[in-house]
Amino acid sequence: MSVKIFNDNNFNNEVLNEKGKILVDFYADWCGPCKMMSPIIDEIAEEIENITVGKVNVDENPEIASKYGIMSIPTIIIFENGMPQKKFIGLTSKSEIESELK
């Protein structure tokens, strides 16, 4: 499955109102560590079934970033049934993220 783009307009419907696990990568285009995480996020989206994976550009969607206390990027939050369950801040290994998704 490809990575979705979440924004102020679709976040409630695509993340908060959905059942199951959803991985959300909070990033910015100028962020070096975010660029390093991007291929890992893409691999997770392709390899793990039954989850939704998406990204939120914090520069374009400051309301969402503020609501979830995003102070450093990259930050990854795993939501389950609309509720945040786990937060990773900074560069995170693929295996550490995957262990929370299974």
Image: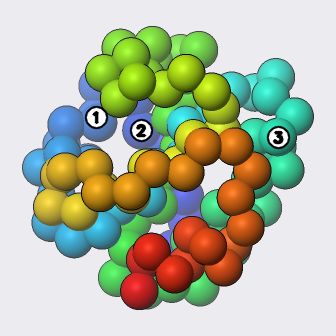
Tags 2 and 1 in contact by the CB under 8 Å rule? yes
Amino acid type, mark 1: Asn
Which structural element holds mark 1? loop
Amino acid type, mark 3: Pro
Q: Residue at the location (57% across, 28% down)?
A: 57
Residue designated by label 3: 33
Which structural element holds mark 3? helix
Q: Give the position of the C terminus as an image quadrant.
A: bottom left
Q: Position of residue 32 (x, y in %)?
A: 87, 34
Q: Earlier in the sequence, mark 3 or mark 1?
A: 1
Q: Position of residue 80 (x, y in %)?
A: 23, 63
The image quarter containing residue 62 is top left
Q: Is residue 27 visible?
A: yes
Q: Residue at the location (82% across, 23% down)?
A: 30
Q: Is residue 13 above or below residue 50?
A: above
Which structural element holds mark 2? strand
Q: Nearer the viewer, mark 2 or mark 3?
A: 3
Q: Is residue 44 visible?
A: no
Q: Residue at the location (45% across, 50% down)?
A: 87
The image quarter containing residue 94 is bottom right
Categorize mark 2 by other alpha carbons within 10 Å: few (<14), some (14-19), many (20+): many
Q: Position of residue 17 (x, y in %)?
A: 12, 49
Q: How many marks on residues?
A: 3
Categorize mark 1 by other alpha carbons within 10 Å: few (<14), some (14-19), many (20+): few
Q: Earlier in the sequence, mark 2 or mark 3?
A: 2
Amino acid type, mark 2: Phe
Residue designated by label 2: 6
Q: Nearer the viewer, residue 96 or 5?
A: 96
64 relative position to 90: left or right: left
Residue designated by label 1: 10
